[in-house]
Image: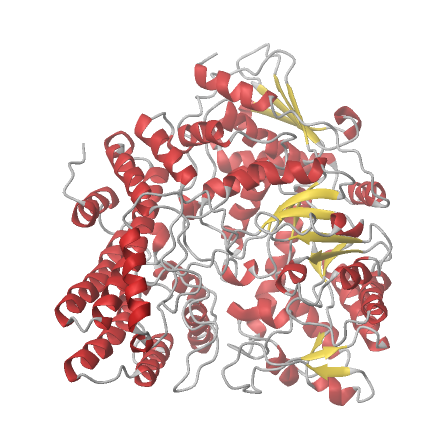
Amino acid sequence: MSSLNLLFFVLIFTALPHPFVSKLEGIDVLLDRLDSKRVNSSVQESAAKAVLQRLLPTHVNSFQFKIVSKDVCGGSSCFLIDNYKRTSQNEPEITIKGTTAVEITSGLHWYIKYWCGAHVSWEKTGGFQIVSVPKPGSLPHVTDGGVKIQRPVPWNYYQNVVTSSYSYVWWEWERWEKEIDWMALQGINLPLAFNGQEAIWQKVFMNFNVTMEDLNDFFSGPAFLAWARMGNLHGWGGPLAQNWLNQQLVLQKKIVSRMLELGMTPVLPSFAGNVPAALKKIFPSANITRLGDWNTVDRNPRWCCTYLLDPTDPLFVEIGEAFIKQQILEYGDVTDIYNCDTFNENTPPTNDTNYISSLGAAVYKAMSEGDKDAVWLMQGWLFYSDSAFWKPPQMKALLHSVPLGKMIVLDLFADVKPIWRTSSQFYGAPYVWCMLHNFGGNIEMYGILDSIASGPVDARVSENSTMVGVGMCMEGIEQNPVVYELMSEMAFRNEKVQVLEWLKTYAHRRYGKAVPEVEATWEILYHTVYNCTDGIADHNTDFIVKFPDWDPSLLSGSAISKRDQMHALHALPGPRRFLSEENSDMPQAHLWYSNQELIKGLKLFLNAGNALAGCATYRYDLVDITRQALSKLANQVYMDAVIAFQHKDASAFNIHSQKFLQLIKDIDELLASNDNFLLGTWLESAKKLATNPSEMIQYEFNARTQVTMWYDTNITTQSKLHDYANKFWSGLLVDYYLPRASTYFDYMSKSLREKSEFQVDRWRQQWVFISISWQSNWKTGTKNYPIRAKGDSIAIAKALYDKYFGQQLIK
């Protein structure tokens, strides 16, 4: 056995889990009932084999897959890997058994990772590294007696209710098939399935005499459906074409069917109370209220202030029941678990606990009337985001409003702000320990690997634990693959992971070989970008992609002096650095580590370029690390420009502002050298779904708007949600972020030349104009952005390292 395989062997057997023993009333019954809904063993085995065919087509005959009962696994879910007792060269080499197809594919992934040194990630984060898998006939044996890995908790949940808008919105079946394969390999068995629900709602609401014209005002455009579903907005980016409704329902049926074939339990949507405005006229006696404003500029009624049907109104149950039954009619009896987030960023009208309890009971009744065995899955984000309202009495009232075991809570932000610790294990309700990690699909190297490696274990073994699963609830995917691989493994690990040791094997797998400089880089990454312990929710606030909107002439002299002192500290080494103090009037960008340390890691990583030049995962990571280091440098350069402006030093201001603009151009060139950082891919995938020119215009507007202004503006005021979904994509930097920053600096320069005030209102008008022009570029002739990379990532990264971080020789 090689030293690498021995290390894999040690890692595996130090993490052998114990069977999950349910202590919660109703959970065992639910698990048995869900097992009874699964498709037969032969279908699941064929589905697992098809995943293997797509992943390793040359090795289809090298593995034998077999579904086994939970009795083989001590009553819980597991997979077993063993050597096949071959009698001829034509027989399989490895047998993988599992209680479902997901367990089998999880076992396949575990085997190729820890015996073959392979790596699986999203295509947009470098894709697969399977060169290290030996040829058929030469697969390594596992230890005598085989390996059995049991889940310590029954569920591995996946998705956030907004992921469908930030990441999946423009996907067709080809991309969805790859995602479901990835999910299966990662062991995900409880995925959200939210596509196509507008087509269901169309049928349901029209049965309540709502017209298609009414629904045109109710549904948003494709890129904003997540927030229309939650009742935050209506109509924005819409209306939805019938073509879209039909396409998405067909797609959803394929998605659900494939999930079922693989033994997954899809989580379907349910009724949260959000209704078309017309329903108030159709049912004038119904208790329908108009909600307050959610982030509009001037409360424009075209998309502001949606309508909510009170859950205690009898009509609520009627509609909720009709929706569940319509889904069952379309998809079959495929699940008992339904998501509902009635109170997500919508505060109840009173904190009276009896009222809150009645609301919860009514929401559940609407589900159970449609499916008598329904279980309510609720995102626990409200307990963090609106903690001022949801005090212990209110939390208990909601959590205890349904029978125990009939509500499962997602502890959505447990990687940073675990609610289970402060709520006595959600006051007895079962919950899933979730990693939120990403906001808006932002691209930034960030994570808390130690929290991921220990948090789920701490929660599960804590006194009176009600934890029943782990989950990944990111708002956007296809970033930071190391974070998602480790989090996925926690679904199968009974003990905490020693992260540094795990990272050594990760680096070997990801690039296909052990390279000392790469291992050293990953140790630095572990202590810097992947060690954020400040408790701040990491929206990317780097100044290139979230440009500060403020008047730099308003600071006092004392504040400038203080800022100068703080600025001088940035070059000093240290475990954590902030661009400004908490109470400073200066703009703040999130920085939780020393960028100088990251730059050291970048140099080491560049030094491995000759050994890994042909490796796609290496090239992706090189672009990402270089982008990260340059982006943090740009934050500092921006502050240099502001300080020069404050000191009325026009010469220094010009130098620093031009350097900031040049950094944008240089980062854009770097990003353009890798297929996975291109704006064109996002825009072209949107346009590809269109079936006519008007849809193409609408979909491109949706795609452009979401990643820039996001929501409404007027001629003098930018959107309150601007840059929430910012992206480091080539094309977006030079054609949107660059002119925005350049215009701002022009106004600063004019102020210095003319010794006049900074014209902040004029600047904002220009920004809005730039945004509207860019979002509506099709009016003057749409620019087609590349969907293929150009340039050599390694050469560009080396040149930029030399340019910005010193003329050091790259060996």
Judge whether 503 appears above or below 549 on screen.
Answer: above
Above or below, 423 against 490 in this view is below
Front-most of residues 648 and 241: 648
Question: Which residue is more in the foreground, 567 or 600?
Answer: 567
- Horizontal side of residue 543 vs 693, given as left or right: left
On screen, residue 88 above or below 49: above
Residue at 76% in and 24% down: 72
In this picture, residue 270 sits left or right of residue 650: right
Tell me if residue 798 comes above or below residue 129 in the rendering. Answer: below
Residue at image position (25%, 66%) is 643
Res 703 quadrant in image: bottom left
Image spot of residue 688 (x, y percent): 43, 64
- Residue 601 point in image, percent of width and height: 31, 38
Residue 209 horizontal/vertical position (percent): 75, 83
Camera-side residue of 283 and 586: 586
Q: Is residue 736 visible?
A: no
